[in-house]
Amino acid sequence: MLATILELAAVGLVLATLALVMQTGAALLLRDRPLPIASHRPLIAVLIPAHDEEMDIQATVYRIKEELSPNDRLLVIADNCADRTALLATQAGAEVVVRNDRDRPGKGFALAAGLRHIATMPPEIVLFIDADCQTNPGGIELLARACDAAKGPVQGLDLMVANPRVPASPRLRLAEFAWRIKNDLRPTGYARLGLPCQLLGTGMAMPWRLVRPDLFATGHLAEDMLFGLELALVERPPRFFRAARVTSYFPDNQRGQSQQKERWVQGHLGLIISHLPRLIYQGLQRRDVGLLALAADIAIPPLGMLALANMLLLSSCLAHMVMAGSIVPVAVAALASCLFLFSLATAWHLCGRDLIGLNEVKQLPRHIIMVMRPIMKLARGQRMPWIRAERIGRPRLPH
């Protein structure tokens, strides 16, 4: 019985790791398959959800306004703010909607309020940019035109980097490496295979005709991924467009980083439970490779969790082999570990050599423990509420 359980666990781990290998391998070996760009510039509305963002909101509004035409709209949703976000956004020249609803906190509800506000004069394309993000020059128009040509949701490259005002610790460098893998390398691999990607919450665009405010009205901890999966289930899967980039900083203190990580991990695990079976079932029923690819993608847990799962499973299988002489679970678990190490080595070669050295490798155990905290809280029934990660003032990002 134990051997069967270990074998099933090992097979599941192999399948999740194979998806990661496929993504990193495609990013390494295949050429770009760029999305087409519409020949005309569509009418754009940019929505910026903002919760207590007085430090960044004016600079963000000024930067985005430079990219917009006179007929475009820029809307800031000042959501449950206790600071001057609404005032400063108005002074910077943005339209502002103030939402005060302490019983329904969260970015999803803020976006729903913004979408309802612009519904009276809808644009052709809606862009979603977080208040602490900056876009690359020309990125907003490129993203909107790619979305218009695709006739569906498009996700730009979403990067987070260490704040130069705070010395980058080895642990933060590990987090930045993991972020590059998740938000750049993996969707790049899928794009080169002609497969869809997840929505990441910022730097994303949708045609207005696909927008449903009720879909956004949620307090889910991973509302961005939820939106993308729901759109994929109605045959409008998101596509990755790397030429448009949004960049922001990681939270500047350990508490802020922990809050953010806990929210993401619990939200991701919740989506695995709620959507993985649906994606597999619908993908098989429709013979839709894109849905099955998204199922494989959300089945990949955070890298720290995947590393720990490989170590624990291989150790358990080795112990069982010593006691019962069963070699099959060990062989499958060893295969999963080898695949995982191969994918990490490929990722390091492609996007980690400037970040990861011996000092960062020494921090791996602490990084894994940090990833496990939200899982243990979830196992004890402690669910993470939607809260904004703590940050300090930050300099402007380079172009």
Image: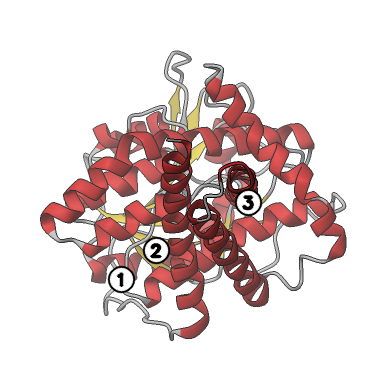
Q: Cα distance, mark 2 to mark 3?
A: 47 Å
Q: Nearer the viewer, residue 236 or 171?
A: 171
Q: Residue at x 39, y 63 (%)?
A: 69
Q: Which of marks 1 and 2 is nearer the N terminus?
A: 1
393 with respect to 188 (left or right): right
Q: Are marks 1 and 2 in contact (CB under 8 Å)?
A: yes
Q: Which amino acid does label 3 sit on?
A: Ala
Relative to residue 378, is residue 393 depicted above or below?
Answer: below
Image spot of residue 52 (x, y percent): 61, 30
Q: Do the residues labelled 2 and 3 touch (CB within 8 Å)?
A: no
Q: Are marks 3 and 1 in contact (CB under 8 Å)?
A: no
Q: Can residue 8 be seen in this view?
A: yes
Q: Which of marks 2 and 3 is nearer the N terminus?
A: 2
Q: Cα distance, mark 1 to mark 2?
A: 10 Å
Q: Which amino acid does label 1 sit on?
A: Arg
Q: Mark 3 points at which residue?
A: 307
**Looking at the rendering, which quadrant does residue 191 occupy?**
bottom left
Residue 41: which numbered mark, if any?
1
Instruction: Quarter of the image for the N terminus: give it.
Output: top left
Image spot of residue 341 (x, y percent): 63, 65
Q: Cα distance, mark 3 to mark 1?
A: 45 Å
| Scheme by which the image is coloured | secondary structure
Q: Mark 2 points at which residue?
A: 69
Q: Which amino acid does label 2 sit on?
A: Ser
